[in-house]
Image (tube, rainbow, N blue to C red):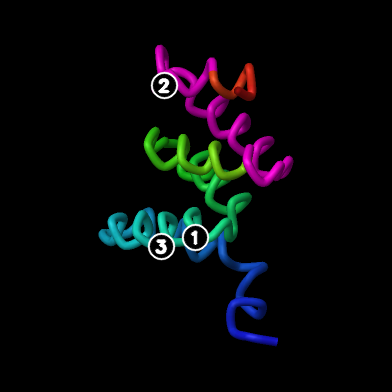
C-alpha cells in the first residue's frame, strides 16, 4: 500500500483545509495535477459543495475528465456543487454542458 492509498479517505478533507487557508493556489495546483491524471475526481468535485464557492475553470476540467472516464460519482458531485452555488454561478456555461452531458 502506498502513501496515496493511505490518505485516500482523507483527501477531500485535506483539500478543503488547504483551499480555505491562505494557500488556495496550492490546492488548485494539486487539483490540476490530479485532474490531469484522472485521480480523486470525486473529491475534487465535491470540494466546491463543501467550501460553498466554485472555480468554474477547475469544475469544467473536472467535468470533462469525469465524463470521459464515465465517473458517475464525480458527475453527481459536480451537480451537487453547482446546485449549492447556484446563485453565484448564474449564467455559467457549465450548466448547459452538464445538463446535456455533452
Q: Position of residue 90 (x, y in %)?
A: 41, 14
Q: State whether residue 30 is above or below residue 50.
A: below
- Residue neighbourhood size for the residue with mark 3, other residues' Cα within 10 Å, grouped as few (<14), some (14–19), many (≥20): some
Q: How many labels does the image show?
A: 3
* Residue that appears at 28% across and 61% down: 23
* Residue that appears at 47% across and 56% down: 36
Q: Position of residue 75 (x, y in %)?
A: 65, 37
From mark 1 to mark 2, how far is it between C-alphas?
24 Å
Q: State whether residue 94 is above or below residue 35.
A: above
As drawn, the residue found furthest toward the top would be 91
From mark 3 to mark 2, how far is it between C-alphas?
23 Å
At mark 1, the secondary structure is helix
Q: Give the residue at mark 1.
A: 34
Residue 30 got which mark? 3
Return the disc, 3 or 2, that comes first in the chain's sequence.
3
Residue 17 got which mark? none
Q: Give the residue at mark 2.
A: 89
Return the disc, 1 or 2, that comes first in the chain's sequence.
1
Does 95 appear in magenta? yes
From mark 3 to mark 1, how far is it between C-alphas?
6 Å
Highlighted magenta segment, given as a residue range: 67-96
For residue 26, what is the image quadrant?
bottom left
Amino acid at each position: 500500500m502506498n502513501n496515496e492509498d493511505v490518505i485516500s479517505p482523507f483527501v477531500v478533507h485535506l483539500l478543503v483545509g488547504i483551499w480555505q487557508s491562505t494557500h488556495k493556489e496550492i490546492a488548485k495546483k494539486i487539483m490540476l495535477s490530479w485532474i490531469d491524471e484522472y485521480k480523486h475526481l470525486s473529491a475534487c468535485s465535491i470540494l466546491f459543495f463543501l467550501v460553498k464557492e466554485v472555480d468554474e475553470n477547475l469544475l469544467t476540467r473536472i467535468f470533462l475528465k469525469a465524463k470521459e472516464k464515465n465517473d458517475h460519482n464525480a458527475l453527481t458531485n459536480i451537480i451537487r456543487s453547482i446546485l449549492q452555488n447556484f446563485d453565484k454561478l448564474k449564467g455559467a456555461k457549465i450548466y448547459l454542458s452538464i445538463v446535456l452531458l455533452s
